[in-house]
Amino acid sequence: MKKSMLTLIFCAIVLFVHAQKNIFPVASTQPNKAQKEQIARKYGMFMHFGINTFVDEEWTDGSIPAAKYNPPAVDAEQWIKGAKDAGMKYVILITKHHDGFSLWDSKYTTYDVASSGNKTNVVEAVAKACKKYNVGLGLYYSLWDRHENGAVKNEQLDKAYNTFLINQLHELLAIAKKEKVKIVEFWFDGGWVKANTRWPVQDIYNTIKKQQPDCQIGINWSIGAPGKPDAHNVHPYEQKDGYPIRYFPSDFRLGDPHLPVNPDPKIFSHDGKNYYMPWESTICLSGKWFYNTKDQDYKSADELYKTYKIATAQDNILIINCPPTTEGRLREKDLEILKQLKVHIDAGK
């Protein structure tokens, strides 16, 4: 075999090995550059929108026909402009909740907008609006998919489902690349239905970081307990420095809808190393995550400002959920309260 051919084969092997190399956060007791940027964003909007919006339910099981999702329009610009006008630095869109309904045209499932009454690619529309208004794009994705992976107790299905999961993440990353938008945050949910070791957490981290290295990755109920790294739920008031990271690798802590305590621990452990992890609080502006025709339990601007001060102290972050309606628009009441809240926030600076 010619020397040049051997060289080509060797280079190919090196490239393959490099491509398979796992990516980890750097052990540290101080925030890294991307974490500092996340902390500086401080305040954002959660947007729960999907098939649940049309049935007055918070969680559904993946059996509601996709055609039930049928907004007359998807006014993503109104959503993002509303967040911008409220002083928010980023948004987090529900791309797929536990029901498995995907808000983009996914080639890996028929349970998505392409099979619904409105085929708008919502992820793409939100990405475009984020670019237009210079608002950070964050994406929520439920690990638990009740449509595709109902048999969560059957470990033999894990490999196929995990491949499906990673394939869908590649699709979401491709949308951001097409729109030339950075994803500032990936917010994962539903991990508690299976042991933490059964989720492809390392593959998730690798997949995202290779394309979006500064994107911050968090998985709900992020921290375990000493001797029980997969303990659920370990609330903020129970967490202490050195507690084990339940889903490693990840960059920040979640546990909705709870607020951090004071003092808030920041240093958590994995495999004998310590990692800095800020806390992101996620709360509802009204009573529900998804739009519900019976939900009239709005928080006042005064109450939200008190929450804002608690949640954003100690280098932590707050996102407030404002659910788009069946009309595909944010509620005017939400926008009114957010404007009042901005007055409080601006005056408190």
Image (cartoon, rainbow, N blue to C red):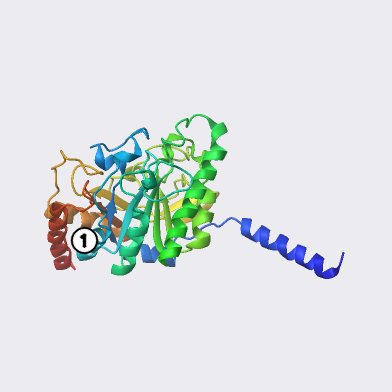
Badge 1 density bin: few <14, some 14–19, many ≥20, Cα 10 Å: many
Q: Residue visible at 40% across and 65% down? A: 179
Q: Secondary structure at mark 1?
A: helix
Q: Residue visible at 48% across and 60% down? A: 28
Left or right position of 334 against 94? left
Quadrant of image for the N terminus: bottom right
Q: Is residue 45 above or below residue 220?
A: below
**Image x and y of residue 125, in percent:** 33, 59
Taking depth in this image into account, of 71 and 207 the one nearest to the observer is 71
**Image x and y of residue 290, in percent:** 25, 43
Taking depth in this image into account, of 163 and 71 the one nearest to the observer is 71
Quadrant of image for the C terminus: bottom left
Q: Amino acid at mark 1?
A: Gly
Figure quadrant of residue 318: bottom left
Which residue corresponds to mark 1?
Answer: 82
Q: Residue visible at 42% across and 39% down? A: 144
Figure quadrant of residue 220: top left
